[in-house]
């Protein structure tokens, strides 16, 4: 498991470097996504991943988050 985490971090760093995205920007995106999702979901800490990669059609950002439940909120507007 630890090797997968380390490998994913290395891949992310190399991809960010290849497409000239500073590592700080990748971390900032992950932080912002975590804050946004935590408004709606009870997230499991350290289980939010943001992967960036290049495809033929352009730059792709893939977000994966693990949650225990969806937060309950009041009535939604109709």
Image (tube, helix red, strand yellow):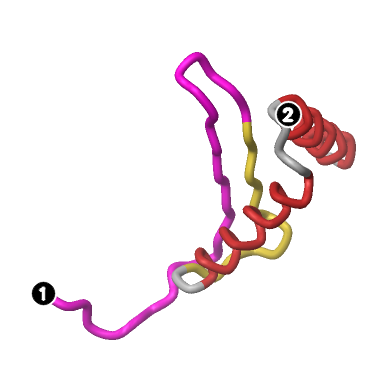
Q: Quadrant of the N terminus?
A: top right
Who's the residue at 65% across and 47% down the image?
49
On the rendered structure, is 12 left or right of 61? right
The residue pinned by badge 1 equals 78
Q: Residue 77 appears at what percent x and percent y?
A: 16, 78
Q: Residue 60 appears at what percent x and percent y?
A: 53, 31
Closest to the observer: 48 or 26? 26
Who's the residue at 50% across and 23% down the image?
58
Q: Residue 16 appears at what percent x and percent y?
A: 73, 34
Q: Residue 13 appears at what percent x and percent y?
A: 80, 35
Tag 2's secondary structure? helix
On the rendered structure, is 63 left or right of 72? right
What residue span does the magenta drawing correspond to? 53-78
Q: Which mark is residue 69?
A: none
Labels 2 and 1: the sequence-earlier one = 2
Q: Would you place residue 78 above or below residue 14 in this image?
A: below
Closest to the observer: 33 or 72? 33
> Are the residues tagged 2 and 1 within 8 Å (C-beta)?
no
62 is within the stretch colored magenta: yes
The residue pinned by badge 2 equals 15
Tag 1's secondary structure? loop
């Amino acid at each position: 498991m630890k090797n997968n985490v380390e490998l994913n971090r290395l891949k992310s760093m190399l991809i960010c470097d290849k497409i000239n995205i500073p590592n700080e920007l990748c971390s900032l995106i992950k932080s912002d996504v975590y804050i946004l999702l935590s408004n709606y979901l009870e997230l499991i800490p350290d289980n939010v991943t943001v992967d960036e990669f290049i495809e033929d059609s352009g730059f792709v950002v893939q977000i994966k988050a693990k949650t225990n439940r969806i937060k309950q909120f009041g009535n939604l507007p109709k």
